[in-house]
Amino acid sequence: MRYYLFNDTAFEIIKVFLICVEFFFVIYLIGYSTFLFISVVTGSSTLYKKRQQDKLKNTILKNHFVPISIIVPAYNEDVTIVENVRSLLTLDYPLYEIIVVDDGSADKTSAKLIDAFNMLPIRRPIQRKIDCQPVEFVYEAATHKVPLTLIRKKNGGKADSLNTGINACKYPYFICIDADSVLQYDSLSKIVKPVLENDNVVAVGGAVRPANSVEIENGRVINYRLPKNIIACMQVLEYDRSFLASRILFDKFNGSLIISGAFGLFKKETVIAAGGYDSTTLGEDMELVVKLHDYCVSNEIPYLIRYATDAICWSQVPESIKDLSKQRRRWHIGLFQSMWRHRVMLANTKFGLTSFISYFYFLIYELLSPFIELFGIATMILAFLVDLINVPFMLLFFGIYALFGSVMSMTAFFARTQTIDLKVTFKDVLKALLLCTVEICVLRFIMVWVRATAFIGYRKRKLQWGRIQRKKINLK
Amino acid sequence: MKIEILIYIYLAVCLAMIGFNIVCIFVFSRGDMETEQSRLYYINLIKEQFSREALEDRHRLLIYKRLAHVRELTAFDKALETLSKDYPEEVYSYLRKLEHVFVALADRYSRRNEIQMAYFPYVISRYRLFEGENLPQINRILVDLLQKPSVYCRENALHAVYSLGISQNVADALKIIDEAGFYHNKKLITDGLMSFSGDKNELDEYLWERLDDYSLNIQLAILDYIRFSSEDFRERMLALLLDNRDSEIHYCAIRYLGRYPYEPAYEHLIKFSEHEDEARWEYTSITCFTLASYPCERTVNALKKCLGSRNWYVRLNASQALERMGLENIDFVDIFDGDDRYASEMMRYRLDSKKLHERAATS
């Protein structure tokens, strides 16, 4: 076919081009496979070590309570908000407060809370340490286990709501959680442990797990099943392979660049000093963590950002491609904004491994990867056209790659379920085995396209709340 | 190297890991089953010994041999936990008779990895073994653990030291941690000291005497502990407050004098509340809170003045102190009618919040 399409000179140029591309992809894939391999091996071994430590009481045994403020930003959450606050009131921790920030919802979010918890209006002065939209009213309830506050403010986005919560909260550490998430009963005592272990800890990420099909009673999992919905089920495997394992690895050298907005603990003083959440970004959770690195290193403040694998938050994951695409687009744009704003971290020796491993990983294998992978597919088509591709080898290579990814997913999945004593049925293991390959071969490529096209039309949505269809979590 | 070869190698390792995971599933479930069987075995074995005056040598030897394995020690621990519910005194007496075995085991466990080693002092503290005894064999493993980088090792060792109930050992243990140069959270130390099983007055005096030997972090932990433990340090705390010390030490002294009012301290506290230097706002803020323990007109006036401070925390603490003193709306007419909106808002909120709590309590 090449003789019809290209002359000899053009063919030679294409050949050289393809050799260069091949070389690039060899390096690219060695890098990715090695990272994945190291992260899964490190992640699994850390989880097993943690299990042994827990069995042999190598833990901070008594409950040493660090006072915590829980901030729940909410926008049009009247379906889930009451149940969510109810579940927060059952947490096994004595010293915390709950602050719900209603970001000018158009539904009955505030009204439902006021009714359900007998809240009363109060004129509460709030110190504006971080700039945020004006407060419309404040309600408080003193009839519950811990103080409950509702702040209704003018609409300004999730980051702005979190900043309002930070301004209002009274304790030195705060936790931000999504309004559709449920904390496990012991999650607070687990997430403060890194703070007790080291005074320099400024932030701790909790482990976010997909809650679809999980039954929870008083913050305890009473029935664990893989979700029936296959999109959600594939995300369970993706969370284990990509998020759990890599975050444990980054934690080893203080290189975490992201703490999920669904569950993270922060030192209030440091967050305020760094300027709080950035309300102009779509990925306020990542932006804050990258900002904390930047702020602490620039000001020569000793700091640690930790990851608590056993502090668990159950959160709904999208169950349709449409919702998932929406979520991933936001994540991708947020990733770009955070990395661009803090580009000072690129190849900067002051940031050490955080720059040379974490930042590079996020730059190459997260931010640029959809473009690189699409470029790879285009190159393959070109190579096919000029008859410079070994099709059986290409298929074999894809096969090995898919198998490799699947084995990684299963390794992380087994390590997680085994080490936190979740009983998984044989049927679920089979389901995981089948879907991990589908996730690698199908879902991943759909997400490549979604992420590559994320920037199209983002200006229209840039200050909107990221929303997926809300369903009640299976709480008993 | 061709990339597929590398991927094959990685694949092989990962397949091995999956194999490892599957083996783990069986090992863990079998391990749990065996631990449960051992627990039941120990329950019967220990119960048999309850009625005896002295333990049989054969029993001691058997226990020594079995507990050298960490899984057996966990099963033994679980058996003791079960028995302690119905036979607390018998278990205590049985363990006292078994202490020689644990002395011998200390040597075995001191050669294990950190995780297994740290389990040993956990058992000691949990069952208050060697209470009041100062045994070199036990001290050796504890000292070793106190110098480990793992906070869990140090914490388990410290709890064992607290359970031994010897003041000097506690003071020495804190010094060892200090000298090893590892950060140990002061809250963990304060709460741990509260669990000391020996003579607390003696411990307070011992720690106070050696206060200057420690780093600031441990000094603060000790002062916090004394605040919860004894009211006999008023005079000394005032002296500490007037001494040229780190501001954090002064804050501890102020808090102490708030918990245990001491008339000679009043003048000094009032002076602190009158600080107008913005850089020293923490002194003013903490003192405001403390002054609630010295109710009188002069205090009310001083706190009302603090309500007008430019610092948020000073205003907040002053309002809380005034509320704690039981004052009502009528007492704040001058504040509510005054020009200072911030002072008025803060005081109003405090009083409204009090009403909210009262209403909640009555409903």
Image (cartoon, grey):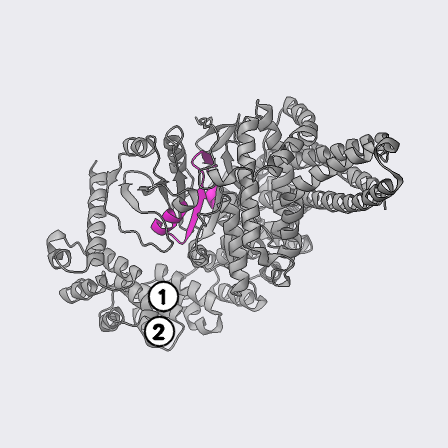
**Which is more toward the observer, B283 or B335?**
B335
Ranked by sequence position, the earlier of labels 2 and 1 is: 2
Specify few, some or many for label 2: CA neighbours under 10 Å numbering under 14, 14-19, or 20 or more. Answer: some
**Which is more toward the observer, B28 or B276?**
B276
Give the quarter of the figure containing the N terminus of chain A: top right
Q: Residue at x 53, y 63 (%)?
A: A298
Tell me: A350 left or right of B289. right
Q: Secondary structure at mark 1?
A: helix
Q: Is residue A306 above or below residue B261?
A: above
In the rendered image, which residue does mark 1 sit on?
B252
Residue situated furthest bottom in the rendering: B244
The chain under label 1 reads B
In the rendered image, which residue does mark 2 sit on?
B240
Q: Amino acid at mark 1?
A: Cys
Give the quarter of the figure containing the C terminus of chain A: top left
The chain under label 2 reads B
Specify few, some or many for label 1: CA neighbours under 10 Å numbering under 14, 14-19, or 20 or more. Answer: many
Q: Amino acid at mark 2?
A: Leu
Residue A297's spot in the image, x, y percent?
55, 62
Q: Secondary structure at mark 2?
A: helix
Residue A299's spot in the image, x, y percent?
51, 65
Q: Is residue A289 above or below residue A420?
A: below
- In the rendered structure, which segment of residues is drawn in magenta? A162-189
Note whether residue B75 is visible.
Answer: yes
Tell me: A387 left or right of B259. right
